[in-house]
Amino acid sequence: MPKRVLVIVAVALVIAAGGAYALRSNEEAAAVGMPANAPTEDAMAQDIGTQIMEHLHRGHVPERSGDIMLVPKPYSYLIGEWDLTTLGTDTPEVATSHPNPWNYLARVPIIVYGPRYAPAGKVVERPVDISALAPTYAELLGMDDFDVDGEPLPEIKGRGKTPKLIFTVVIDGGGWNALQEHPEQWPFIDSLRQQGTTYVNATIGSAPSITGALHATFGTGDYPINHGIPGNQMRDPEGANVDTWLQNADPRFLEAPTVSELWDEQNGNKPIVATVSYEGWHLGMIGHGAQRDGGDKDIAVLWEAEENEWWTNESYYELPSYLQETDLDRLERYEAKLDPRDGLKDGTWFGHTLEVLQEDLVRPGTPAFVKFTGDEVLEVIEHEPFGKDDLTDLLWIEMKMPDYAGHAWNVTEPEEGDVIFETDRQIARYKKALDDKLGKGNYLLVISADHGQQPLPELFGGWRINNKELERDIVDQFGIDILEKATPVDIYLEREVLDKEGIGLDEVARYLGTYTIGDNIPDGAPGADRVPDARLDELLFAGAFSTDYLQALSPEKIAGFGDGIYPEGDLTIGDEGE
């Protein structure tokens, strides 16, 4: 019996045993203001433990992050309004979000291949994180003055010769939990493990586990608290909530230089610095381009979903002439061939019609788009003069497709496995092209990921948190509209209203520490009777922390939180990559 069916049967039994659900009325709700039984922020931090609190502290950017950082309990996550009538059915809600700090999202591979630089077949169990890559590259390049949060990986050494190219592939959403869910779908990546060095206890180093922040950590070697990018959204200097890259691939909010742009500038902008990525959120890998004094227009090939074309912000970056015209016909040919990949020639790919698969916000989550992106990466490798001089070039590739597939269909489903399989095939193509152009052993190939993915909550006892109902409840609880915006990561509050009403940020954070499944069910919501009575009083958040609290944390304070009560708070739990 398929896993999904087993899950649905189990949930149905729980619901049947739970009996009818009685919706709580407004009269039964807690009194306006912070409840008397609300936990302190210290108490919530103690439950979460040192490792996660350290990541939260590193990932919080004062004046830019939200006013309250949210930590849903393991396997719970925030989404928008969702349909409770899907509970216990064979069509559960599959949409997810993944900004949470727990180990299944935080643990990622770091695999380093390069016969002259990385020991073959070596497995390193020492805890490391993705901030180590930039200083490792700096050390290989002889950049003695590169001072960042991360520490170089001592196993990776130049041994008297610098690589012609440092080629980094970040598999978006390709953390260990995604790879383990589909263990047969990445044979080439696994072969690189045998030929190179694998860090099985690597993490993303900070929280939340969100794209914009972590790609900047890859590029700079700093955590968000120092590179300034808290995620995909932030407050700008005027206090407005904005897209971190201003929806225009604008790098102005990145406060730290990347290893790539520093190396480029130190060598008169002669090295080639380039990326092929899905969108501007990933530019933290290469840096500011021509926006930075002394910089130049580095190559940035980005996808524009609404226009279905490759593009860039030409004020700061370059889109090569050979990619100026996007070959959509080729992408459509690849999409037309998706049908038999699921083992059944029936006009669909895992039940999804071609019309659905070609929708703008679905298209990037298919194997067809993986191959299409791979073609463009090979175009860049072929056309650019990598390795033609003594100065190391740096090429950063972001493979967005596994993350997209996980959001659309869930990491546990076969669509995700097929996308991972095609991603693996494209990485094999990249290596062959590099061997042909640069010669085996003359480059460094590094594979990592920016986070894992969120499985269906039914698998692990989690819950989908209705983001919109949470917003309504915060306003109702405090009796006044104090809310600017709630995201899957954090809550932005109206500071002037708080000050006027004498409401502290800590009061809102502590209220969220009392928030339950029952609280989160909208009045009169269809399907509310499908929620088991036994779950109504379950708390939804392991913690919620005000910006004031996170900023005040010292290393000594964080160390004193100890192990915490959640197994998912242990970020280094053995050789999970095997």
Image (cartoon, helix red, strand yellow):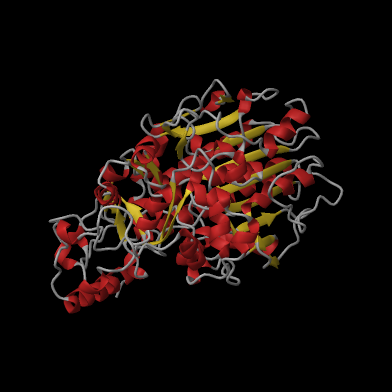
Task: Find residue 372 and report its horizontal and vertical position in percent.
Answer: 46, 41
Q: Nearer the viewer, residue 44 or 181?
A: 44
Q: Quadrant of residue 328?
A: top left
- Toward the right, the furthest residue is 160
Residue lying at 64% horizontally and 57% vertically, measured from the top left: 555
The correct choice, above or below, for 232 with respect to 516 in the image is above
Q: Which part of the image, by quadrant, shows the C terminus?
A: bottom right
Task: Find residue 19 and report its horizontal and vertical position in percent.
Answer: 15, 75
- On screen, residue 364 versus residue 122, left or right, reads left
The correct choice, above or below, for 308 with respect to 490 in the image is above
The correct choice, above or below, for 142 with respect to 573 in the image is above
Q: Is residue 425 visible?
A: no
Q: Nearer the viewer, residue 277 or 382?
A: 277
Residue lying at 39% horizontally and 47% vertically, measured from the top left: 365
Q: Which part of the image, by quadrant, shows the N terminus?
A: bottom left
Task: Find residue 406 and report its horizontal and vertical position in percent.
Answer: 39, 54
Residue lying at 49% horizontally and 45% vertically, measured from the top left: 211
- Toward the bottom, the furthest residue is 17
Q: Quadrant of residue 270?
A: top right
Q: Is residue 517 visible?
A: yes
Q: Nearer the viewer, residue 22 or 282?
A: 22
**Count of numbered circles on the image:** 0
The correct choice, above or below, for 200 with respect to 371 in the image is below
Task: Find residue 408 and report its horizontal and vertical position in percent.
Answer: 34, 51
